[in-house]
Image: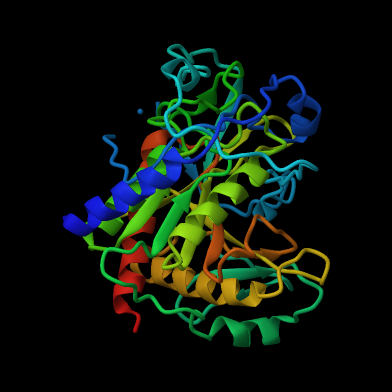
Amino acid sequence: MERRKTVLRSAGVVAGLVVVPLAVWGFSFAAPVLSGITASGAMLSMGSVTHGKVTSGGSAMLIRAPVSSGCRDLEAAPEEVQLRSPVPVEIASAKPDPEIIAAVPYPEDLNSRDGVIQKMNFGHYDGTQYFDLDGGGQVRNGSDEWDNASLYAESKKSPDFSFQTSEGQPLVLIYHTHTTESYEPSDRDFYDASFQSRTTDPSKSVVAVGDRICAELEKAGIPYIHDTLLHDYVSYNEAYDSSRTTVKELLAKYPSIKIALDIHRDGLQREDGTRLSPVAEIAGRDAAQIMIISGCDDGSLGLPEYIKNFHFACALQQQLESSCPGLTRPILFDYRHYNQDLTTGSLLIEVGSHGNCLEQALYSGELVGRGLAELIKSSP
């Protein structure tokens, strides 16, 4: 208990040293950029760095079928776009005004039937880009530098860092670059188009998913930090710059952090407007399927040690699949940056999509947290 208090107190000090962003911009500038992103809308760059706890709806028919027909290359997660700002942003205040938190409330009424939500299980893939991992799950190889055989050999290697840490020092950082990403209120087969699947209410966003991950780490006695700074409002363009600044500050303060997981939700939608809800049945309950993204580099992205992140991605993927078969979609190994140069255990995890309901996403957060804790505990 004392070490958790120590981590909490120290994290609070870090957060207390930060400053309010120099500029506040409206949502309107983001509309052209987000036109291809189905889950566009309002975001926030304020919050706190703490140990978090969270307290936690017609169902649609589950369709088990290939997803390539009529979809926009969904397995490659095209909805996740990183935009870079020429001017770095500063870290926001750790104690935002309640009015800021309430800036984009979760809607009370979402009953307009404007489109269809279709449940789908993203199962096993065949094709030249895919290969199976020995312990379960798959990899989608989107690189030009690696053939499948060479990348498969890398997948067998252990993570390149120690899972051990000093007493009371955090090992894991959970954060959210797109902090306001949220989910449907219940498991249903329609969506209300007035809702852009974003909110500054942390109990309804990916922050709540992060809380579930952290709860499992806490149960296992693994020290962690949960950064709940809301990085993507009011400037979506600067979200990755904002989260980068925060992560670098925390790594400087806590060099014991080896694992940095950026928790998002995807936005999967067919060309006809049908939103997809990727699910897997785990222990009799629907869980939102997850996808790990491990970026690679052709020499132009500034990720010199990207293959070390991939080693960790494969270890985590296999751990999750061994305990919860079907929970994961293939690891996406592709030309993505996502601030994955900051540690050799840096990954982005998409938890479900905007067609999933919050309950499914929270359950997946619990499963990811449990699997991560099991991986850490079983590693030398």
Q: How many marks?
A: 0
Q: Quadrant of the C terminus?
A: bottom left
Q: Is residue 257 visible?
A: yes
Q: Quadrant of the N terminus?
A: bottom left
Q: Residue 7 versus residue 136: which sits nearer the camera?
A: 7
At x 35%, y 57%, the residue is: 224
Q: Which residue is the extreme one toward the front?
A: 17
At x 32%, y 65%, the residue is: 373
At x 52%, y 17%, the residue is: 103
Percent coordinates x, y for residue 96 in the rendering = 45, 25
Question: 182 left or right of 210?
Answer: right
Percent coordinates x, y for residue 301 in the rendering = 78, 63
Percent coordinates x, y for residue 366 in the rendering = 33, 51
Question: 85 left or right of 62?
Answer: right
Question: 202 left or right of 214?
Answer: right
Q: Residue 206 versus residue 343: which sits nearer the camera?
A: 343
At x 43%, y 13%, the residue is: 108
Q: For residue 54, what is the image quadrant?
A: top left
Relative height, residue 380 to residue 312 (above, below): below
